[in-house]
Amino acid sequence: MDMLSDIPYSVPDKNKVDPYRTFDFYPSRGPEPRPLLCFVHGGAWRSEDKSDHSTLARRLVESTGFPVVVPNYRLSAKDRVFHHPGHTEDVLEFLHFILTWHQDGVVFDRSKFYLIGHSCSAHMLSSIILDSSHVTPTLTPKDDLLAAVQGVVFSEGIYDIQKLLGTFPPYRDWFIADAFGDRPTYDDVSVASYRPRAEHVRWLIIHSKNDTLVDTAQSEAMIDRLKATHPSSSVEQSLGEFEDEHDAILLNPRYAQLITEFVGA
């Protein structure tokens, strides 16, 4: 079976599919159920599409032997008010949907998920896997979903928005105010201050030393927090190996190889 594209996971209007709430599924070969990899794209909460990452998805299938899903989610824009946690609520809805989704020819192990986030989606997925209930209770995952998540891989992640604005002040007007509202502080949505929901989840934090859009201090802050709240064996990192720019890291063959090693494929 070849990939399945533009599958709706939410249809609020029964007469019209929202392309921002659809996903693509890249199957693995063979009848044996394998763990599922879910890649959530970045784009500063305002851009990119699941189709932009078909090369990475196919490479991950080939490298790991696992099926891969890539969802879309609704985006913020200058002419459209759509704020956090809306983007992440879409992703959580997708994750709950995929856990029970059945279609002829689709086979995967529903008890083992790995989540992969890049840039802003590292923040989004952290808001689900870590405990954000004191700020955004709508991002609380169901028990069966949380139990299924075996590990997360984040690259070039945004975790502490207030710290990010201290380094890149123009980001407020470029995309942060559109995604979170124009607020005096963003400390409460710093996922680098959240506590774990589950100790069984393993973490791999990746950051290229040549990323000019998001500085390594973001990943360093997240690693420090994870090591303070998680068993040390559950937190892995790669902060100096890559020399790619912010998005180019996703097309480096070593990126897929590192994920393959992490998931034990």
Image (cartoon, grey):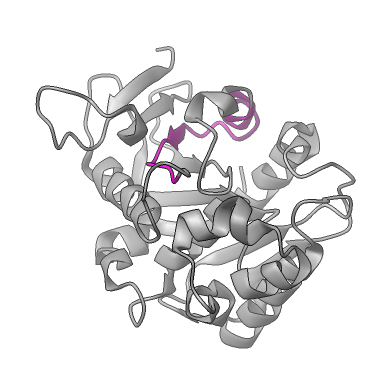
Can you say which quadrant of the picture contains the C terminus? top right
Q: Is 214 left, or right, of 241 in this rendering?
A: left
Please identify the residue farthest to the top as the structure is shown. Answer: 2
The residue positioned 53% from the left and 37% from the top of the image is 47
Residue 149: horizontal and vertical position, in percent? 42, 58
Q: Is residue 58 magenta?
A: yes
Place residue 227 in its image quadrant: bottom right
Place residue 226 in its image quadrant: bottom right
Residue 27: horizontal and vertical position, in percent? 44, 24
Whether residue 231 is situated above or below residue 55 in the rendered picture: below
Question: Which residues fall within the magenta stretch?
Answer: 56-76
Whether residue 72 is situated above or below residue 85 in the rendered picture: above
Q: Nearer the viewer, residue 11 or 4?
A: 11
Q: Is 248 left, or right, of 24 in this rendering?
A: right
Q: Nearer the viewer, residue 84 or 54?
A: 84
Can you say which quadrant of the picture contains the N terminus? top left
* Numbered disc total: 0
The residue positioned 73% from the left and 73% from the top of the image is 166
Please identify the residue farthest to the left as the structure is shown. Answer: 14
Q: Is residue 258 visible?
A: yes
Residue 256: horizontal and vertical position, in percent? 69, 38
Whether residue 14 is situated above or below residue 2 in the rendered picture: below
